[in-house]
Image: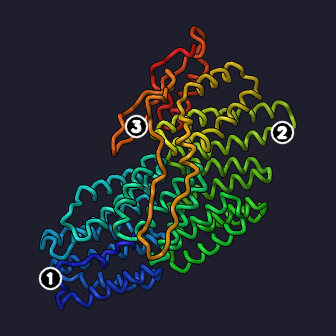
């Protein structure tokens, strides 16, 4: 849910505006509607006037409440325009004004709701600035202030959960994101289709990132259908962009190109600078995948030159990663490596770093195949291996963050499996039999649940949505552990028992001693992976494989 979905002016006051502040309140409401329809510049001009109206020596509690609403709406406008530092500055002043109003008049004008909504919007802006820890802290603070006495408590509860879901996705915590998205959806269903669309969109993104394109398409289609019932301009644009990305990942290039062009037009019309950059990146990726490599490189380099280097972190990461793909496709490997390194330096989650380094490893393997001398070929194969093996160990470890069920299995089959295939192929090509043997033993001691229930759940379709009907939703059934499910002794420990709010998770499995008495070959690679990706690949305890 974008920052304008619950605009500060849209929060009902508990008392009508007095004559002194009624003109300002009406102007603020007008600006909020302009924001909702994508007329960002016009809204910002009005909001600046409203803020100026409240900057008087004898401002009272109602005037401070109005100032808070106008400043928080202005923060949303600046975020849309890509001026993230200005957005945070306006949000901070708006929250200070809200606190001052509450101190003077309590919550008679629903200022607490304005305050909490502003905290959620600020956290979303901090996310765009790559300040994840501050964003999580802001959402926790907003949730701590929430209670049933607030104006529109259900809508605020959804806003907090939805914003946290988006943040968890960007942080690479996909299982936590899926759990939070389901909780957000349960709240949203009671609020109506438009809010549920945001939860469906997040579920679609999670499905995309775990390799289930069918579910992603279904979720995103539901999201689009619900947003068409009256969503904000920013939300409608995002739906078009997400569907274009889904089409691209499924190889429907013409549809994807049309979708990204439409998304870019919508973003430009609404003044959504960050989303315009994301749409242009997607369009360049389609050009690359459809064989127009030179055009893709030109589009990406033009975009990167225009993007603010202090903002648009996630958009620059994607653009650099696709630029690496494009330069690799035309065999300009040094340029490709430079682009991949730039993308890696912008990544913050272990999952994103793994994806970038896997692409780097594939590029070095291709470069090796093009090398003329045996020495150059060997060096580049070793560089590819040095990237691929830690990625393999890290992606297998990241799987332990998922609860047993469909999401975990999709990660194993769609994300970890390609890393395993590349690492094994490179190690075999280099003739490193001891490392290959330990990699096999390590992989054999990694738990997975290949059950009929998981396979059935992956193929189960989502329900259709019909306008005017009560919004339907049935969660994809999760695989559950039974007495018949056995875990290998060296596979994993149980991190925590399952509950309604905390599903069963696996702890990092112990290290595997492939040949007791011999020097461990894989240990140094595990240390490298843990240092590079900041995660526990294996527990400190060790077990013998034989």
Within the image, what quadrant is residue 306 found in? bottom right
Within the image, what quadrant is residue 382 found in? top right
Mark earlier in primary sequence (2, 3): 2
- Of the two numbered discs 3 and 1 in the rendering, the one whose residue sits closer to the viewer: 3
Does 279 appear above or below 205? below
- Disc 1, SS: loop
Mark earlier in primary sequence (1, 2): 1
Label 2, label 3: how far apart the Cα atoms are: 48 Å
Q: Position of residue 221 (x, y in %)?
A: 55, 66
Label 3, label 1: how far apart the Cα atoms are: 58 Å
- Disc 3, SS: loop
Mark earlier in primary sequence (3, 1): 1
Decide: marks 1, 2 in contact (CB < 8 A)?
no
The quarter of the picture where the N terminus appears is: bottom left
Question: Which residue corresponds to mark 3?
Answer: 504
Does 417 appear above or below 161? above
Residue 92: numbered disc: none
Does 474 appear above or below 82? above
Residue ID at (52%, 66%):
464
Residue 58: numbered disc: 1
Within the image, what quadrant is residue 116 found in? bottom left
Label 1 CA crowd tier, 10 Å (few <14, some 14–19, many 20+):
few
Q: Observer-nearest residue: 468 or 24?
A: 468
User: Does residue 385 appear to the left or right of 265 in the view shown?
Assistant: right
Question: Which residue corresponds to mark 2?
Answer: 371
Decide: marks 3, 1 in contact (CB < 8 A)?
no
Label 1, label 2: how far apart the Cα atoms are: 76 Å
């Amino acid at each position: 849910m974008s920052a304008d979905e619950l605009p500060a002016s849209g929060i009902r006051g508990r008392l009508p505006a007095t004559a002194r502040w009624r003109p300002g309140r009406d102007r603020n409401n007008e600006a909020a509607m302009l924001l909702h329809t994508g007329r960002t510049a016009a809204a910002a001009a009005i909001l600046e006037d409203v803020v100026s109206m409240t900057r008087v020596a004898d401002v009272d509690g109602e005037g401070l409440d109005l100032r808070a609403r106008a400043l928080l709406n202005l923060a949303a406008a600046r975020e849309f325009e890509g001026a993230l530092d200005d957005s945070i500055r306006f949000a901070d002043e708006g929250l200070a004004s809200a606190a001052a109003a509450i101190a003077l008049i309590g919550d008679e004008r629903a200022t607490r709701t304005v305050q909490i909504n502003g905290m959620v919007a600020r956290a979303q802006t901090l996310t765009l600035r790559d300040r994840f820890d501050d964003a999580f802290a802001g959402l926790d603070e907003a949730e701590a202030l929430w209670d049933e006495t607030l104006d529109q408590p259900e809508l605020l509860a959804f806003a907090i959960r939805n914003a946290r879901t988006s943040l968890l996705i960007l942080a690479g915590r996909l299982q936590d994101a899926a759990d939070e998205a389901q909780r957000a959806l349960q709240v949203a269903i009671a609020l109506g289709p438009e809010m549920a669309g945001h939860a469906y969109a997040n579920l679609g993104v999670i499905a995309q990132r775990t390799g289930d394109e069918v579910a992603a398409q279904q979720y995103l289609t539901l999201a689009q259908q619900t947003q068409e019932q009256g969503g904000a301009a920013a939300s409608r644009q995002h739906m078009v962009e997400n569907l274009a990305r889904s089409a691209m990942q499924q190889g429907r290039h013409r549809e994807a190109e049309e979708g990204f062009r439409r998304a870019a037009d919508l973003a430009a019309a609404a003044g959504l600078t960050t989303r315009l950059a994301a749409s242009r990146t997607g369009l360049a990726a389609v050009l690359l995948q459809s064989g127009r490599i030179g055009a893709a490189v030109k589009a990406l380099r033009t975009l990167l030159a225009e993007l603010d280097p202090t903002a648009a972190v996630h958009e620059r990461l994607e653009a650099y990663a696709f630029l690496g793909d494009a330069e690799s496709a035309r065999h300009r490997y040094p340029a490709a490596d430079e682009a991949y390194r730039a993308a890696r330096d912008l990544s913050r989650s272990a999952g994103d770093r793994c994806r970038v380094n896997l692409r780097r490893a594939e590029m070095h393997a291709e470069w090796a195949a093009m090398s003329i001398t045996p020495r150059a070929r060997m060096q580049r194969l070793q560089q590819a291996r040095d990237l691929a093996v830690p990625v393999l160990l890290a992606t297998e470890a990241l799987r332990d963050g998922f609860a047993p069920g469909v999401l975990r299995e999709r990660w194993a089959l769609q994300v970890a499996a390609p890393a395993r295939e590349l690492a094994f192929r490179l190690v075999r090509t280099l003739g490193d039999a001891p490392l290959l043997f330990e990699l096999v033993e390590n992989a054999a001691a990694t738990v997975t649940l290949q059950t009929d229930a998981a396979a059935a759940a992956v193929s189960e379709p989502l329900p259709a949505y019909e306008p005017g009907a009560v919004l339907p939703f049935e969660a994809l059934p999760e695989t559950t552990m039974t007495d018949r499910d056995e875990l290998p002794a060296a596979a994993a420990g149980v991190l925590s028992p399952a509950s309604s709010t905390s599903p069963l998770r696996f702890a990092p499995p112990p290290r595997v001693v492939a040949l007791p008495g011999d020097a461990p070959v894989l240990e140094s690679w595990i240390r490298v992976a843990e240092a590079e990706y900041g995660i526990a690949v294996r527990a400190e305890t060790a077990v013998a494989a034989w």
